[in-house]
Image (spheres, rainbow, N blue to C red):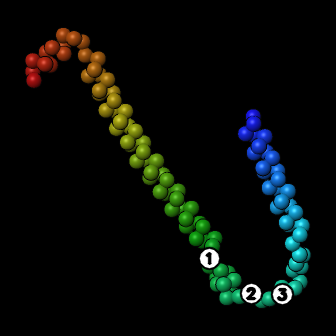
Amino acid sequence: MYNFVLQLIVFTSLGIVVYLMARALPRVSDSETTRGPNWIDRLMKRVPTQEIDRGINVFLVKFLRKLKLVILKIDNFISHRLGKLSKKSSIPPEKKEEEKQLF
């Protein structure tokens, strides 16, 4: 409880400091900075962001489906092997002696 109270006091004081600093900053209006778009803005407008986003989503869907399939195959393989191991470990004592004689 003591740590919680200390953390609460620290973050409250940090919030107050940030608030006071924000109030002390000079006000800047949007009308003073009326410049035209620079070359970076024009370049970014030409980039087909929606098509890139759509392509990334299609790739992720295909990749995640294939990954899910691989994970399920691994899970089935491990389950199958565990089933075989549990069957071997549950052999009655008479058969264990017979298996020892075979080797």
As drawn, 85 above or below 30: above
Say left or right for 62 vs 41: left
**Quarter of the image containing the N terminus?**
top right
Q: Earlier in the sequence, mark 1 or mark 2?
A: 2
Quarter location, residue 76: top left
In this rendering, the label closer to the viewer, 1 or 2? 2
Please report the residue visible at 57 percent of the width from the left and 61 percent of the height from the top: 57
Counting every numbered tag in the picture gives 3
Q: Position of residue 70 (x, y in %)?
A: 40, 47
* Amino acid at pointer 1: Pro
| Residue that numbered label 2 is attached to | 37
* Amino acid at pointer 3: Thr
Mark 1 secondary-structure assignment: loop
Mark 3 secondary-structure assignment: loop
Task: Check disc 1: other Cα within 10 Å, few if <14, some if 14-19, many if 20+.
Answer: few
| Residue that numbered label 3 is attached to | 34
| Residue that numbered label 1 is attached to | 48
Q: CA distance from mark 2 to mark 3?
A: 9 Å
Mark 2 secondary-structure assignment: loop
In the rendered image, the residue lying farthest to the top is 94
Say left or right for 76 vs 3: left
**Quarter of the image containing the C terminus?**
top left
